[in-house]
Image (cartoon, helix red, strand yellow):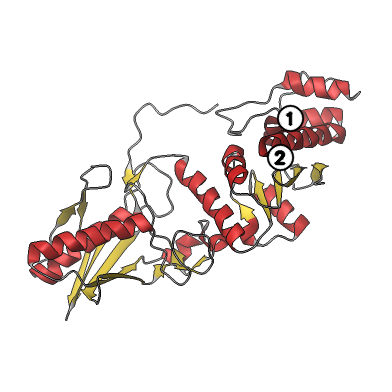
Amino acid sequence: MSRKPDTELRKGWTTGACATAATKAALEALWGGQFPPDVSLTLPKGETPVFAVAFSDQGPGWAEVGVLKDAGDDPDVTHGALIRARVEAGENGVSFHAGVGVGMVTKPGLPIAVGEPAINPVPRQMMEQVVTEQAQNFGQTPDIKITITIPGGQELAAKTWNPRLGIVGGLSVLGTTGIVRPFSCAAWIASIHRGVDVAIATGQDHVAGCTGSTSETTVQRLYDLPDHAMLDMGDFAGGVLKYLRRHKVKRLTIGGGIGKISKLAQGVMDLHSARSQVDFGVLNDWSQAAGLADVSDANTALEAVEIAGAGLAQIVATRAKLHVDEFLADGCDTDIVVIDRAGNILGRAPAK
């Protein structure tokens, strides 16, 4: 059981907020002739953080500023990255461009069109608002080309969900509030939703959600699924199932270790060890009803299977499928794959 920290976790700022701050500072240099040491922003929910200028450069008709991303106490792979915005005269309002380290959208289903830089709608709106405000302050026309660059972004993107979502070449510029909430489930759930959207938009009728990398590898190989069919479910079975109930696909596979799939079989939707536990009394009832061994003294679900045999894993898979089918109201064909730590299949409840 995990323990809550003794002190409140420190919040941070999204990539989108950093890009907006860099844009604001760069516009001050372009139109005002001087780089400020820092800039403040008003975020969508009213917060007013101050961002220090960490990089600045200027040339004929352009200015560029970099802001270091501070993700607070969140384990964000982009924490410490330099988010740079170059501004220069444009045409017909604000246009957005991807510099080195910022990805391009190559698949439909995302909130940004194919062929566009992966700069999400709210960061775009924030930057457009800053351009409008700064243009008014300096008596300029708000026609600006903004190029966002994130040095090292392509390497960092390999540690994110971007490649399987069809975002190539780098990171996304994200954020809906401008704030990173430490260890928030919201970003993970949002990524699951985007994964479903991309799969549907690309005509992928079979998707899979797995609890970890081992089960994901096993399931992907078992069905020869492409990367964009693999949803990063982790512990959020409920996040996958609730979204698929409203955004239907033809087939869903759920894969995972015996412990987490046992929880799912018992009706649990959040599979994290800090928020749910296997009910060994129920597991023992299932085992003995099938004529298998008493597993009431087992310390883990895997130990229970070692005591009772693979038949118990099969029972767990079957009951998990029943629960998933009931939740989805037969909205799609489902199957469950239970694996051990080495990736071997212990039990499997196939689709219809």
Residue at 71% over, 56% down: 220
Q: Which residue is mark 2?
A: 257
- Identified by mark 1, the residue type is Ala
- Identified by mark 2, the residue type is Gly
Asked whether the viewer can see residue 80, the reply is no
Task: Determine whether, in the image, residue 337 is placed left or right of residue 241.
Answer: right
Task: Determine whether, in the image, residue 122 is placed left or right of residue 278.
Answer: left
Q: Position of residue 120 (x, y in %)?
A: 39, 59
Q: Quadrant of residue 146?
A: bottom left
Residue nearer the viewer, 52 or 291? 291
The first of marks 1 and 2 along the sequence is 2
Q: Residues within 10 Å of mark 2 (few under 14, many from 20)?
A: many
The tag on residue 339 is none
Give the Cα distance between marks 1 and 2.
9 Å
Q: Which residue is mark 1?
A: 301
Residue at 41% over, 68% down: 117
Under circle 1, the secondary element is helix
Check if mark 1's residue and mark 2's residue have beta carbons within 8 Å: yes
Q: Position of residue 72 (x, y in %)?
A: 34, 43
Under circle 2, the secondary element is strand
Q: Quadrant of residue 327?
A: top right
Q: Quadrant of residue 321?
A: top right
Residue nearer the viewer, 89 or 65? 89
Residue that lies at the very extreme toward the bottom in this rendered image: 60
Above-or-below relation of 20 to 317: below
Q: Position of residue 116 (x, y in %)?
A: 42, 70
Residue at 79% over, 21% down: 284
Asked whether the viewer can see residue 142, the reply is yes
